[in-house]
Image (cartoon, grey):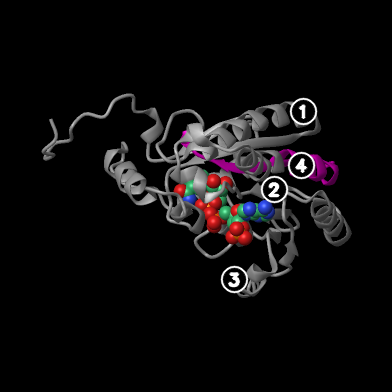
């Protein structure tokens, strides 16, 4: 049986708010295989939760970093260089759009809301990749999180869908730039999972139940399934040939072109 040993490997995981965060699900298999993880979080209010969550992870470090602030990004990567010297993996699992953008029609998106959503949810990956590559001289791998609303209209997702489209395009350009250095960049397109960010989206309850009812597997995905896909994309022994890609973990939902009434349903 194949044994994965990530002892001596260093990871940066961005975007853990609590144990339901997809960033946390992505960190679990890395930590279990022996990787040492640096966690970055937006604000000081999250630190006590992170201290508790990571108390059993040897060598885990915590770093405040609001990704809209270049000085905080520079400080984060300065800390990583000082503490670890190199970096093997980056998990970018963060996004933000103002609540009004989910509630109002997309056509009413304001300029400042557009800029903020793009800054946090798309540009931050570019800003992180540009700093991380300097610590990845021996190669490395990055994953980010996206959603089907980047490609198709998903009601309510609005500005975040546009930001995810920019994020997915950025993944391809970053993968092209960093490929010669042996650094891979991929996006995981996850089906709905009940997290804090997801619950703040107007109509998320309906999106969640419809995705579970209509997917090929007739169920929702789990955060652990996102973590498993992340591990396989990050680790070169498993996903070494994959870069510039958006990979789905959504129980097959994205590949269905038409939804027919299901057996036992009253529809139609
Ligand atoms: P989550 O636990 O709420 O994580 C979102 C994270 O983004 C939080 O840690 C949040 O910090 C952080 N963040 C927001 N603005 C930031 C900033 N300026 N600087 C640094 N961090 C910032 O929710 P999640 O669902 O796991 O989200 C992780 C990623 O998965 C997001 O990209 C999301 O779009 C994507 N995704 C989620 C789903 C889903 O259904 N849950 C599906 C597909 C893709 P604060 O808590 O401090 O705001």
Element under disc 4: helix
Q: Earlier in the sequence, mark 3 or mark 2?
A: 3
Residue drawn at point x = 43 percent, y = 55 percent: 194
Image position of 224 with respect to 116: above or below:
below
Residue denoted by label 1: 177
CB atoms at circles 4 and 2 under 8 Å apart? no
State yes or no: discs 1 and 3 in contact (Cβ < 8 Å): no
Figure quadrant of residue 128: top right
Q: Is residue 144 left or right of residue 19?
A: right
Q: Residues within 10 Å of mark 1 (few under 14, many from 20)?
A: few
Which residue shows up at 65% across the image and 70% down it?
A: 45
Residue indicated by mark 2: 90
**Image: magenta residue range:** 125-149
Mark number for residue 53? 3
Which residue is identified by label 4? 127
In the image, residue 156 lies at what x, y percent?
Answer: 42, 41
Q: Residue at x 66, y 45 (%)?
A: 120
Kindly report the distance in space between the C-alpha atoms of the residues bearing marks 3 and 2: 19 Å
Q: Position of residue 101 (x, y in %)?
A: 51, 43
**Which residue is more in the foreground, 262 or 86?**
262
Q: Position of residue 27 (x, y in %)?
A: 60, 57
Q: CA distance from mark 4 to mark 2?
A: 12 Å
The one nearer the camera, 200 or 103, is 103
């Amino acid at each position: 049986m194949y044994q994965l040993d990530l002892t001596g490997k260093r990871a940066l995981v961005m975007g853990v708010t609590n144990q339901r965060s997809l960033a946390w699900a992505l960190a679990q298999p890395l930590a279990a295989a022996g990787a040492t993880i640096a966690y970055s979080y937006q604000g000081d209010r999250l630190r006590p939760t992170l201290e508790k969550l990571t108390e059993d992870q040897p060598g885990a470090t915590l770093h405040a970093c609001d990704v809209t602030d270049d000085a905080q990004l520079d400080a984060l990567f300065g800390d990583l260089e000082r503490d670890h010297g190199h970096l093997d993996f980056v998990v970018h699992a963060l996004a933000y759009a103002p609540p009004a953008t989910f509630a109002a029609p997309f056509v009413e998106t304001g300029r400042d809301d557009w800029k903020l959503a793009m800054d946090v949810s798309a540009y931050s990956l570019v800003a992180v990749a540009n700093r991380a590559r300097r610590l990845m001289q021996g190669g490395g791998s990055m994953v980010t999180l996206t959603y089907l609303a980047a490609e198709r209209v998903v009601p309510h997702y609005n500005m975040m869908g546009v930001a995810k489209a920019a994020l997915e395009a950025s993944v391809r350009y970053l993968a092209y730039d960093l490929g010669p250095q042996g650094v891979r960049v991929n996006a995981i397109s996850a089906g709905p999972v009940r997290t804090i960010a997801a619950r703040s989206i107007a109509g998320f309850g309906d999106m969640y139940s419809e995705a579970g009812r209509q997917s090929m597997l007739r169920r929702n995905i789990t955060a652990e399934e996102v973590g498993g896909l992340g591990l396989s994309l990050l680790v070169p022994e498993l996903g070494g040939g994959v870069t510039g890609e958006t990979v789905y973990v959504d129980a097959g939902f994205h590949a269905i072109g038409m939804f027919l009434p299901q057996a036992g349903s009253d529809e139609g």
